[in-house]
Image (cartoon, rainbow, N blue to C red):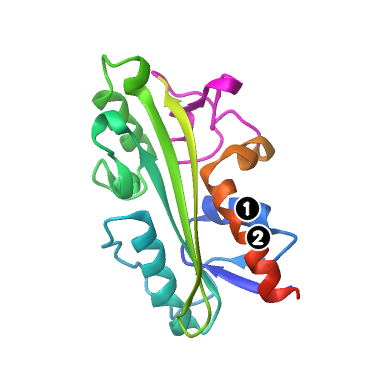
């Protein structure tokens, strides 16, 4: 099975990508690569810039196919926040509880369209020389709940409700979430690219 390295050490993101691409490529994260930097500073102002930055930095360093992925939550009523700062919006990177608490505080007293939001996932695929082969994006619209529900997923998932399902990403099964989610939609666009590269 061909291998693609996810430019991250996020085990939950790795788990989702493994499920989405299980029949196409073997996905691993940076754990088997001690030469990989501890962190790549996300200096981009867009999800695409950050995804490209991760992929183009890591691919030649590891001499591997690398998938750089950047994702986050956009709330139009908050001027697009948290956006590219989603994982570190409350100050500490990856503190989901603090980020969710800040989101609820920012939306306190707001209702209707003011609570509409969408998730974005942008993935950039690089060959081992660092050349970008593909960039894909997926989006998923939902509504920010007033209280978190469910223990599945990660990030803002317990607050991100899909109205048609009357459930948050934290409550939906993996299979349903993959069919609807921003990451699922982005990877659906990437699958034929990977098949063309590795299976022709």
CA–CA distance in space, label 2 to label 1:
5 Å
In the rendered structure, the answer to whether residue 181 lies left or right of residue 142 reads: right
Circle 2 residue: 191
Q: Position of residue 110 (x, y in %)?
A: 28, 16
- The quadrant of the rendering that contains the C terminus is bottom right
Of residue 1 and residue 152, the one placed in the foreground of this image is 1
Magenta-colored segment: predominant secondary structure? loop
Of residue 125 and residue 145, the one placed in the foreground of this image is 125
What is the number of the mark on residue 188?
Answer: 1
Magenta span contains residue 159: yes
Q: Residues within 10 Å of mark 2 (few under 14, many from 20)?
A: some
Magenta-drawn segment: 146-173
Task: Give me the residue at 26% from left, 62% from top.
Answer: 43
Task: Give me the residue at 46% from left, 80% from top.
Answer: 131
> Is there a contact, CB below 8 Å, between mark 2 and mark 1?
yes
Task: Give me the residue at 33% from left, 33% from top.
Answer: 75
Does dot 1 land on a helix, a strand or a loop?
helix
């Amino acid at each position: 099975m061909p291998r693609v390295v996810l430019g991250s050490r996020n085990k939950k993101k790795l788990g989702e990508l493994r499920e989405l691409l299980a029949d196409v490529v073997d996905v691993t994260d940076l754990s088997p690569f001690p030469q990989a930097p501890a962190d790549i500073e996300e200096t981009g102002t867009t999800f695409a810039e950050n995804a490209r930055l991760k992929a183009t930095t890591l691919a030649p360093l590891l001499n591997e196919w690398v998938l750089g992925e950047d994702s986050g939550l956009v709330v139009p009523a908050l001027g697009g926040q948290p956006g590219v700062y989603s994982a570190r919006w409350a100050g500490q990177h990856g503190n989901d509880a603090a980020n969710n608490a800040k989101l609820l505080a920012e939306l306190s007293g707001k209702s209707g369209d003011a609570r509409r939001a969408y998730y974005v996932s942008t993935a950039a695929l690089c060959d081992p020389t660092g050349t970008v082969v593909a960039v894909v994006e997926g989006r998923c619209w939902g509504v920010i709940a007033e209280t978190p529900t469910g223990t599945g997923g990660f990030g803002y998932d317990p607050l991100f409700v899909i109205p048609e399902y009357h459930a948050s990403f934290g409550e939906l099964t993996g299979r349903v979430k993959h069919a609807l989610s921003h990451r699922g939609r982005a990877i659906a666009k990437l699958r034929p690219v990977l098949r063309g590269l590795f299976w022709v």
